[in-house]
Amino acid sequence: MKVSEEIISLCNISKHYVTSNTFGVSDINISITKGSFVAIVGESGSGKSTLLKLIYGLLSPDNGEVLFKGKHVDGPLERLIPGHDQMKMVTQDFNLNTYAKVYDNIAGMLSNTDLKSKKQKTIEMMEFLRIEKLANKRVVELSGGEQQRVAIARAIITEPEVLLMDEPFSQLDSGLKSLLRADLRNLSKNSGITIIIVSHDPIDGLSLADELIVLKNGFLIEKGEPYQLYNFPKDIYTAKLLADCNVLDKESAKQIGIYSDSQAIAIHIEDVIVENNPVNTDYILLNTFFKGFSEELLLEKNGVTIRALNLQIGKYKIGQILSITIKKYLEFK
């Protein structure tokens, strides 16, 4: 049986900014396993990018320590050129030589001691990321998605043990997002590299990561596998962040027939089943919102609004009286 090896450890890490409104991070304790794919998620300003920079060594913590394989990670006050030798970071500006060719941007990361091997490795890397046809193009001529792939190739060609990515999908449309997600998943599985991404979009983490780290106002709210956090979150913040859900307080829940001792409940919109049942018709359909393959229904009962997912577009009309069944709900103290 393979034993999981810890590669990154954050021990009581805190970092606060005196001159800005950014939260930073407070009292973070996290262990990251070698070869895992981790996504750091949270609302804007929750401390995601700060945490990534602390891991890489671009920032020094005010308190605590960052460890790589049990050894201290030097910060900018301890290193002339910040950043750990066994890690690479891809930022939102890509940091490419925009007027150089794609091939030269990638090959330039390797030494000239073995030119044949250097050329072969560069070509293999471009083929892996499907950018071999761009080899002789200048970076300035590329789209955002193509530049993203060049930046990744440039980062991983030196075979780092950890790849850090800050908002890797922020400049991509949905089609390119899907392709890049597939590339990163393949990279994680085939190379054994540890990948840590920061994303404001929880879908990126849910679809890719082995583990999610949820931050709010600089604090670690919870961490765990995507399936577990989506279906059984411990904190209502996680529920709202990861899922499209209805959040009701105790009194509102009672108004629609849910009697709970909890202070709040959350209901995923896919768990609200809408029916045209003449026996129990007590919800009025206030509005519908077309979402492509589905529509969202906005229903109301006793002054409480509930959103539901409907895959049969156009089945129900605004003003229609309907009934609903709630398959399950989450309770939060």
Image (cartoon, rainbow, N blue to C red):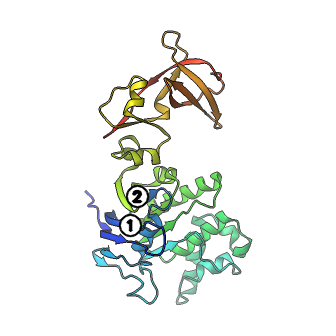
279 or 250: nearer the viewer:
250
Residue at point 33%, 63% (across, down):
33
Helix, strand, or loop for circle 1? strand
Q: Which residue was labeled with disc 1?
A: 25
Q: Position of residue 98 (x, y in %)?
A: 68, 78
Residue 118 bears which disc, if any? Answer: none
Q: Is residue 57 left or right of residue 1?
A: right
Q: CA distance from mark 1 to mark 2?
A: 9 Å
Query: Is 210 or 231 nearer to us in this picture?
Result: 231
Cβ–Cβ below 8 Å for labels 1 and 2?
Answer: yes
Q: Which residue is mark 2?
A: 215
Is residue 272 found left or right of 141 in the rendered image? left
Q: Residue at x 38, y 79 (%)?
A: 60
Give the crowd class for mark 1: few <14, some 14-19, many >=20 residues within 10 Å: many
Crowding near the residue tagged with mark 2, few <14, some 14–19, many ≥20 C-alpha atoms within 10 Å:
many
Residue 137 seen in render = no
Foreground: 61 or 302?
302
Tell me which corner region of the image, top left, top right, bottom left or bottom right, holds residue 330.
top left
Determine the residue positioned at 59% across, 53% down: 178
Q: Is residue 61 left or right of residue 136?
A: left
Q: Is residue 81 above or below residue 240?
A: below
Q: Earlier in the sequence, mark 1 or mark 2?
A: 1
The C terminus is located in which quarter?
top left
Label 2 SS: strand
Within the image, what quadrant is residue 250 found in? Answer: top left
Total marks placed? 2
- Amino acid type for the residue under numbered disc 1: Val
